[in-house]
């Protein structure tokens, strides 16, 4: 596990501790600032760059791979047209020499620290999934920000031993509304199981297919309401049983089938009216409904 730390000094004199952990074998990447996660990504096995803000400063992390080895750079971007950089340009015109000296001091404060070993002995060779499987603990994380913006960021928080952790991570699903891996729309307040490492809860994995009981109940209610709206001739007991069968046979993804039972293929390639119709006509569905609902 490669681990680096930098100290960034803001214009107002505030020091910010920036840290990075990257597994060269698993590709898992985590960047944090002052113990708060800035970004998390998985399977980064080639060069890549990331941008994020510390206060009003646009910062960039560069991951480069050459001859099988990874190198890392943390820099501030003084060229992009941000409000802070606009203010600096005005100050440059008034105090050219002072600004040059200041920028030089800022650049000198970006210091790289040697790599440290996160886990000892054989743990170095374990992937995050293997470590979570062998020693991980579980809790619930709540979605606090599920935007419809272009960058598709998901933010959730959880608490371990009385200490809160907030995670903001890119979500790769190119959809609106934002869909979890199960196909259900992500909403503020949704809760999911996460498994974390006790000695470092920032190393964790969220399971969108394992919602809390409250979130699961909302999923069922949404699926049932959608079905009864599309098929008003069906009874409430039928829609309730349908949701139970869907969840028992296919988990949360089964409820997504019902939720998008009237969607066109162009609207949702994964779950749509064609997929729903095929499921209703399947032998598996008929047997499950007969066993569960006596139909």
Image (cartoon, rainbow, N blue to C red):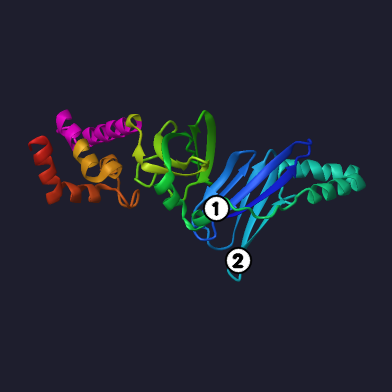
Q: Is residue 126 in sight in this rendering? A: yes
* Front residue of 3 and 152: 3
Q: Residues within 10 Å of mark 2 (few under 14, many from 20)?
A: few
Task: Decide if residue 215 is on the left or right side of residue 161.
Answer: left
Mark 2 touching mark 1, by CB under 8 A? no
Q: Which residue appears at 38% of the width and 47% of the height?
A: 181
Question: Which residue is at the far front?
Answer: 121
Query: Residue 7 sits in which quadrant?
Result: top right
Query: What range of the chain is rendered magenta?
Result: 215-242
Which quarter of the rendered picture does the N terminus lie within?
bottom right
Looking at the image, tell me whether mark 2 or mark 1 is earlier in sequence order.
2
Question: Which residue is at the far bottom?
Answer: 67
How far across and down, in percent of the image, does residue 149 sit? 52, 42
Residue 225 highlighted magenta (yes or no): yes
Above or below — where is 23 with respect to 209? Answer: below
Task: Decide if residue 8 is on the left or right side of residue 126.
Answer: right
How far across and down, in percent of the image, does residue 205 sit? 44, 45
Residue 141 highlighted magenta (yes or no): no
Q: How many marks?
A: 2
Residue 91 has which mark? none
Q: Is residue 260 in sight in this rendering? A: no
Query: Residue 72 sits in which quadrant?
Result: bottom right
Residue 120 has which mark? 1
Q: Which residue appears at 27% of the width and 40% of the height?
A: 255
Q: Residues within 10 Å of mark 1 (few under 14, many from 20)?
A: few
How far across and down, in percent of the image, does residue 73 sit? 68, 56
Which quarter of the rendered picture does the C terminus lie within?
top left
Residue 69 has which mark? 2
* Front residue of 208 and 224: 208
């Amino acid at each position: 596990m490669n681990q680096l730390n930098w100290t960034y000094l803001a214009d107002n004199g505030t020091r910010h501790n920036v840290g990075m952990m990257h597994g060269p074998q698993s590709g898992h990447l985590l960047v944090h600032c002052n113990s708060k996660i800035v970004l998390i990504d998985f399977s980064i096995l080639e060069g890549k760059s990331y941008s994020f803000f510390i206060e009003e400063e646009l910062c960039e992390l560069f991951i480069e791979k050459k001859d099988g080895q990874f190198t890392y750079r943390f820099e501030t971007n003084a060229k992009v047209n941000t409000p802070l950089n606009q203010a600096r340009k005005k100050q440059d015109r008034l105090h050219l020499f002072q600004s040059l000296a200041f920028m030089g001091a800022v650049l000198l404060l970006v210091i790289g620290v040697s790599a440290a070993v996160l886990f000892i002995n054989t743990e170095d060779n374990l992937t995050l999934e293997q470590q979570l499987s062998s020693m991980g603990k579980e809790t619930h994380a709540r979605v606090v920000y599920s935007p419809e913006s272009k960058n598709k960021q998901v933010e959730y928080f959880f608490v371990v031993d009385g200490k809160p952790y907030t995670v903001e991570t890119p979500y790769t699903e190119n959809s609106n509304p934002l869909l979890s891996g199960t196909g259900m729309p992500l909403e503020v307040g949704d809760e999911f199981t996460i498994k974390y490492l006790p000695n470092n809860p920032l190393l964790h994995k969220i399971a969108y297919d394992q919602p809390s009981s409250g979130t699961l109940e909302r999923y069922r209610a949404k699926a049932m309401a959608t079905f009864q709206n599309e098929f008003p001739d069906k009874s409430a007991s039928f829609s309730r049983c349908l949701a139970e069968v869907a969840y028992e046979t296919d988990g949360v993804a089964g409820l997504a089938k019902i939720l998008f039972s009237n969607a066109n293929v162009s609207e949702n390639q994964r779950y749509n009216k064609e997929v729903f119709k095929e499921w209703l006509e399947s032998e598996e569905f008929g047997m499950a409904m007969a066993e569960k609902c006596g139909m």
